[in-house]
Amino acid sequence: MRLLDKFFGHKVEYPPLPMDSDAISKLDDIKTPLEELAHQVSDHLQVVPAEHEAFVFLGKPPQNFGIAWIHDGKVSSLNDMAKEHHLSDVQVGELIFRLGEAYQHASESPRYSAKFGGKEMVVIPSEGLEQEVHQIMANTLH
């Protein structure tokens, strides 16, 4: 049924993110840049909160998506990261491929809805996904 929902464009409704969750406090730490990103991007946003940072899948992962990294009070887009770290197109493609795999590994993780910057987004408070994405980014950018 979920496949048909995706095919026909049905939006999946997730329960609200519990106000007493660890994810709320993590998101509060990066609230300003997250709200700025929400205003700048028209795509779907799926946020993976972490300590003092967050990884944001833009679009429709695992096939057609981008990534933004909120850290140090700023948002770094995939293009920003590629330029800053002199990544080739092949390296960017490998990064996207590995991030898509990480997203799929967390397909059974609970998802919640939250609103930041007036935009509804999906929050994936998965420690496993956060660690896998962080490791992929660290291996690629360092």
Image (spheres, rainbow, N blue to C red):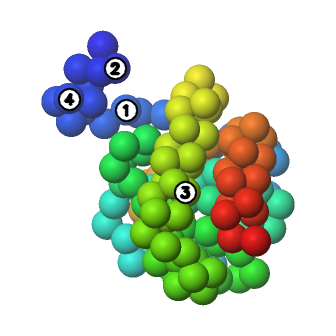
Mark 1 neighbour class, 10 Å CA radius: few under 14, some 14 to 19, many 20 or more = few
Query: Element type at marker 3?
Result: helix
| Amino acid carrying mark 4 in the image | Phe
Residue 68 is situated, as x and y percent measured from the top left of the image, at 54, 67
Residue hosting label 2: 2
Measured in 3D between alpha carbons, the distance from the residue under mark 1 to the one under mark 3, in whole angstroms, is 27 Å
Measured in 3D between alpha carbons, the distance from the residue under mark 4 to the one under mark 3, in whole angstroms, is 26 Å
Residue hosting label 1: 12
- For image coordinates 71% across by 75% down, the residue present is 71
Earlier sequence position, callout 1 versus callout 3: 1
Earlier sequence position, callout 4 versus callout 1: 4
The answer to which image quadrant residue 59 occupies is bottom left
Measured in 3D between alpha carbons, the distance from the residue under mark 4 to the one under mark 1, in whole angstroms, is 12 Å
* Closer to the camera in the image, 95 or 114: 95
Residue hosting label 3: 95
Query: Element type at marker 1?
Result: loop
Above-or-below relation of 22 to 38? above
